[in-house]
Image (spheres, rainbow, N blue to C red):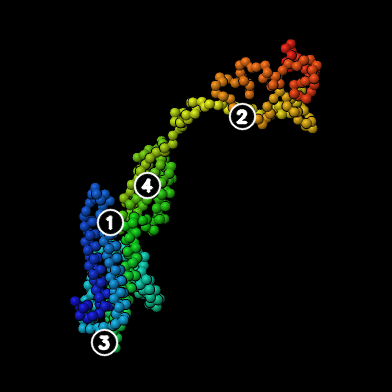
Amino acid sequence: MWCSSTNSIALTAYTYLTIFDLFSLITCLISYWVMVKKPSPVYSFGFERFEVLAVFASTVLAQLGALFILKESAERFLEQPEIHTGRLLVGTFVALFFNLFTMLSVRNKPFAYVSEAASTSWLQEHVADLSRSICGIIPGLSSIFLPRMNPFVLIDIAGALALCITYMLIEINNYYAVDTASAIAIALMTFGTMYPMSVYSGKVLLQTTPPHVFGQLDKLLREVSTLDGVLEVRNEHFWTLGFGTLAGSVHVRIRRDANEQMVLAHVTNRLYTLVSTLTVQIFKDDWIRPTLSSVPIANNMLNLSDHHVITMPSLKAADNLNPITSTPAKPSSPPPEFSFNTPGKNVNPVILLNAQTRPYGLSLNHGSTPYSSVLNQGFGIPAMGATQGFRTGFTNVPSRYGTNTRGQSRP
């Protein structure tokens, strides 16, 4: 009602801070309710995330109000209305008193933790620079200005100061545009103060690991991996359950001969100093010795195929032997032509039909062979002193080396 009577948008922006203080009181009540409630089967981790959600909702609503003030201020620059200062200064001091009383008299645990854990706003950084300059001149004020100032108290004082300047300029020079400028300044300060808190509480809701505990967690995990019986620490996940409460789960692989209860007690004792809600899963080494029964047998190993493949052995020892005289041949002598279809050292594998029970020879048919086919293969019995040899390029070879009674060459 006072904002409508004064027609001041700067006072409206400052009133939104009062609405934020009301939400902070509601968050404080939720925090006390969470302390009383016990974990249930539905909420096994407790109800601490309710206060995180309350802080996130309060800061986001304050930023939405700041965006609304920026939109209204842009419209007022086109047509600036007249501002009535009758209740402007009174409303400023009433709102300042209510804001300071709310923030300083009530112990609001969630907002106190967020204001310390979240990153500093641009308003805090500028005030810190100014404080260092003042303390350089007056060192006695270092205990008051140098510590990190409460962002809520800081924005309340800065908003009230902007409204006092607006009141003086309107009363002296009727400069109504300064009210719109003050509204923009209060909206920017509100947005800059609430944004880091929204980011921090949003990361908590997303179950991310807080950055300030990375080093401590790495140190503890290294200590756990060096415990007696521990082989590996895997699938570790740690997140912030609530403000100041860290939860986590980890899988620990141990030796087959290690005591599970003993390892569990040591791991929990190490991690409990930092992680209050911890779940540890212990499992032993899962290596298995391979057995014959575990090896799968292919079907083609039981059922023989239609053909057998026999690989010819490599005759390395006979590479330097003359196929006719069985004596070492000189390297300069030309290689022999061929004798009795003797296979060489680079002969391809011979494929035999599966119908044969055992191979009697290579590339030879079994059973009775016609006499004509024998002659065609070059196994005829030549007469002594005949001019036709055994396809070796030599004549009268049998008479030179001798024959047996049947006229076949000796082996």
**Would you call the spot at circle 2 few (<14 residues within 10 Å), some (14-19), or many (20 or more)?**
few
Q: Quadrant of the C terminus?
A: top right
Distance CA(mark 2)–CA(mark 3): 112 Å
Apparent side of residue 165 relative to residue 402 in the rendered image (left or right): left
Q: In this view, does 348 lie to the left or right of 121?
A: right
Snapshot quadrant of residue 143: bottom left
Q: Residue tagged by mark 4?
A: 250
Q: Residue at x 38, y 56 (%)?
A: 213
- Residue type pointed to by label 4: Val
* Three-letter residue code for mark 3: Glu
* Residue identified by numbered label 3: 171
The CA distance from mark 3 to mark 4 is: 66 Å
- Up the image or down, 117 lies above or below 184; here it is above
Along the horizontal axis of the image, is 19 left or right of 279?
A: left
Q: Which amino acid does label 2 sit on?
A: Pro
What residue sits 22% from the left and 77% below the top? 3
Relative to 294, does residue 65 appear above or below in the rendering? below
Nearer the observer: mark 2 or 1; the answer is 2
Label 1 crowd (10 A; few <14 / some 14-19 / many >=20): some
The percent position of residue 296, horizontal first and vertical second, equals: 46, 31
Q: Which amino acid does label 1 sit on?
A: Arg
For mark 3, give the secondary structure. helix
